[in-house]
Image: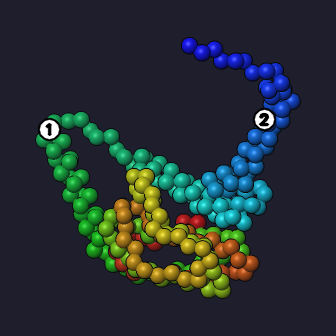
Amino acid sequence: MFNSQAPAPGDLPSSKQLVKSTVIAAAAAAVILVTVVLPSEYGIDPTGTGSMLGLTEMGEIKTQLAEEAEADLKKTQEMQVPAATGATTQQGSGLMDRLIHEFGVRAAFAQEMRQDEMSVALKPGEATEIKLTMTKGAKATYEWIAEGGVVNFDMHADGNSGETTSYEKGRAKPSGSGELEAAFDGKHGWFWRNRTDADVTIKLKTSGAYSDIKKVM
């Protein structure tokens, strides 16, 4: 068994050194909070550093997606009707009706083909978002152009049951095109932001299996 030798009083940090170390650590944490955490997570950029590092846009997108997911979840909860308790035959009939209704709606959405064009003007710093209402597996082709400049974008989706996903992101892009396949039932589309010093007009063309197209912001 060994007895450890107690350190000499001179080897221990003084109270002043401990206070100084604590203050330095707190200041460093505050700097990281203001310059990195707030811009990247909440889109709050009091110093402007987040914009320089590209973190502010990330936080704004996260906040926007979180708000939309919460709003969709509330709508879903409001639309849910408690199942009635009754005889076995009534429950079976109700279940069959719901299945027929659900698959009937899905089939109608899947077969509905449409074409649309939309145009949105964005001043410097402004953003917009356009969403398609699609069922899982439905496909739509798209093409968008930023006339007058370039934009940052996020092609993403918010599900009816709270799901979220991002299909593609880009910075300083003049255009985009391709095919969008819905990962789940819900709203699927694009978020654009004009980070230039000039006005930009977004022109979007879509064609495919979706029931609605709407500018949500």
Residue at 76% across, 46% down: 28
Kindly tell me whether residue 71 is visible in this rendering: no
Kindly tell me whether residue 72 is visible in this rendering: yes
In the picture, measured across the screen, residue 38 lies left or right of residue 207, that is right
The label shown at residue 44 is: none
Q: How many marks?
A: 2
Q: What element carries label 2?
A: helix
Tell me the quarter of the image containing the C terminus: bottom right
Residue at 75% across, 21% down: 7
Whether pointer 1 and pointer 2 mark residues with C-beta atoms closer than 8 Å, the reply is no
Residue at 66% across, 51% down: 37
The residue identified by callout 2 is: 22
Q: Is mark 1 on a helix, strand or loop?
A: helix
- Return the residue found at the far front: 2
The residue identified by callout 1 is: 88
In the image, residue 121 lies at what x, y percent? 64, 78
Q: Nearer the viewer, residue 31 or 117?
A: 31
Residue at 62% across, 86% down: 147
Q: Of the residues shown, which amino acid type is indicated by label 2?
A: Thr
Q: Mark 1 or 2 closer to N-term?
A: 2
In the image, residue 184 lies at what x, y percent? 36, 61
Q: Nearer the viewer, residue 89 or 74?
A: 74
Q: Label 1, label 2: how many angstroms apart (C-alpha)? A: 68 Å
Circle 1 residues within 10 Å: few <14, some 14–19, many ≥20: few
Q: In the image, is residue 209 above or below residue 29?
A: below
Q: Of the residues shown, which amino acid type is indicated by label 1?
A: Thr
In the image, residue 75 lies at what x, y percent? 45, 51
